[in-house]
Image (cartoon, helix red, strand yellow):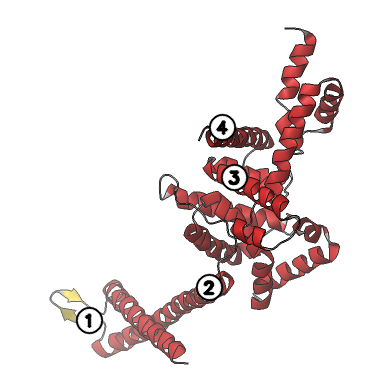
Amino acid sequence: MILAAAMNPEAFSGAQDAIARMRRGDPDALTAMISRYQHRLYRYLLRLVREPAAADDLFQQTWLRVMEKIGRYDARRNFESWLFSVAHNLAVDSWRGQRGESLHDASDGGESPGALLRTGDPDALERLLDFERGAMLAACLHELPAIHREVLTLRFEEDMKLEEIAAVAGVPLSTVKSRLRRALEGLRAAMDARSTGGKGA
Amino acid sequence: MSEHEASHQAIAGMLALAAAGALDLHEQRRLEEHARECPACRRELEIWSGYSQGLRRLPQPPVPAQLMERTRTRLVQEHAAAADRRWDELMLGALALFAWTVGLTFWFVARIVTGGELVVMGANLVRFGTWTAGSTVLVWLTAAVAALALGRRRRELRRAL
C-alpha cells in the first residue's frame, strides 16, 4: 500500500508540491507532510531506538530539523531518503550522548491473539499462526544490533533500494550489502535459538 | 574441494541477499543456474524467502495518540522562539546604532562646550579615544538591557493574546 502510494505519480507530484510550499513556510504543507510520513517515520525510529518515548522525541526533532534545513534540501534528491537520513543522524547524535542502547521493550500494538480467535473467522487460526510468527520475528529483530535493525526495516518495511539505504545510513553500498546479509543471518540465528529453546521447554 | 563444491559454497553465501532482492543481475543469474541443479540451495532459498516475506509483514507499531499534534505544537513554539531570537538581535543592533549616533552627537556638543578639554582624574574625557571607549561600554550595556526588556514585553503581550 505504501509502495503503491510512493509509485503513484499523483502522490509524487503532491509531495513535490507540498515540499515547495514547505520551503515557503506554509504550515498546512508541513501538516500534510507530517501526516503523510508519520507512520513510516515513527516505525523506522521505533525499530532503530526501540524505546517509544525516544522514538516520539526523535520524531518531533526530525520535523524541527526538516523545517530548519528544508531551504537547503536538493529537490533532485529523493525526499524520503533525505527525511530518513535526517532521522538517522539525530538518532546517532542521541546515542552519542547516552552510551549504549535502551533494553526496554517496545510495544507491538495491533490485534491480540485472543481477539483474533474470538472473531469466528474461518481463517482465524491461519492468521493467529501468522500473528505468532510475526510477533516472534519482531521479537528477534528487536534483539539485533541497531545497524542491523535499521537495514532490515529500511529494506523490507520501507522497501528502499540499497542505494537509498546507503544514502540514509551514510555508508557505501558494499557496507549496506554486508550489513543486510549479517542482519538476516543474525535474525535467522535468533529465530532458530528461540525455536530450539521453545521445543526444549 | 571440487569446482561444484566451491561454487555451492559461494552461492550459499548469496542466498540471504537473493531473498532480499539485493543481488546484481550477474549474481542473480549465477544463483539461478546453480539452484536449478542444487536442491539444497533451492530449499535454503525458500527459507530465506520466508524470512523476507515475514519481515514485510511484521506487526506494525501504532503511532502514539496526539504525536502529530504535539509535533505541530513544538514546531509552532520553535518557530516563535526563532522569530523572537531574530527580533532580539535586530533590536539590539538598532538600539546600539541609535545609542552610538547619540553618543557621537554628544561628543561633538561636549567638545564645542568644553573647548576640547574636560579633565577628570587626569583623563581628558572629550578626547576621541576615551569618549569612544566609554560610550561603547555604555552603548552596548544600554542596548542589551533595552532589547531584553522589549523582547520580554513582546513575549508577555503574545502570551496575553
* Front one among B122 and A72: A72
Task: Name the residue carrying label 2.
Answer: B70
Crowd band around label 2 with a 10 angstrom C-alpha radius: few (<14), some (14–19), many (20+): some
- Could you tell me how far apart the alpha carbons at marks 4 and 2 are, in whole angstroms? 44 Å
Spatial CA span between label 3 and label 2 = 32 Å
Give the percent coordinates (x, y) of residue B80: 51, 78
Spatial distance from mark 1 to mark 4, Cα to Cα?
A: 98 Å
Image coordinates of residue A58 in percent, x first then y, are 52, 59
**Chain at numbered mark 2:** B
- Marks 1,3: beta carbons within 8 A: no
Task: Quickly name the residue at label 1.
Answer: B117
Q: Which residue is located at x 38 percent, y 84 percent?
A: B152
Give the residue type at disc 1: Glu
In the image, residue A182 sits, relative to residue A3, either above or below, namely above
Task: Indicate the quadrant containing the N terminus of chain A: top left, top right, bottom left or bottom right.
Answer: bottom right
Q: Which residue is mark 4?
A: A196
Q: Which mark is residue A136?
A: 3
Q: Amino acid at mark 4?
A: Thr
Q: Is residue B57 left or right of residue B114?
A: right
At label 3, the amino acid type is Met
Q: Residue at x 72, y 33 (%)?
A: B47
Q: Nearer the viewer, mark 3 or mark 2?
A: 3
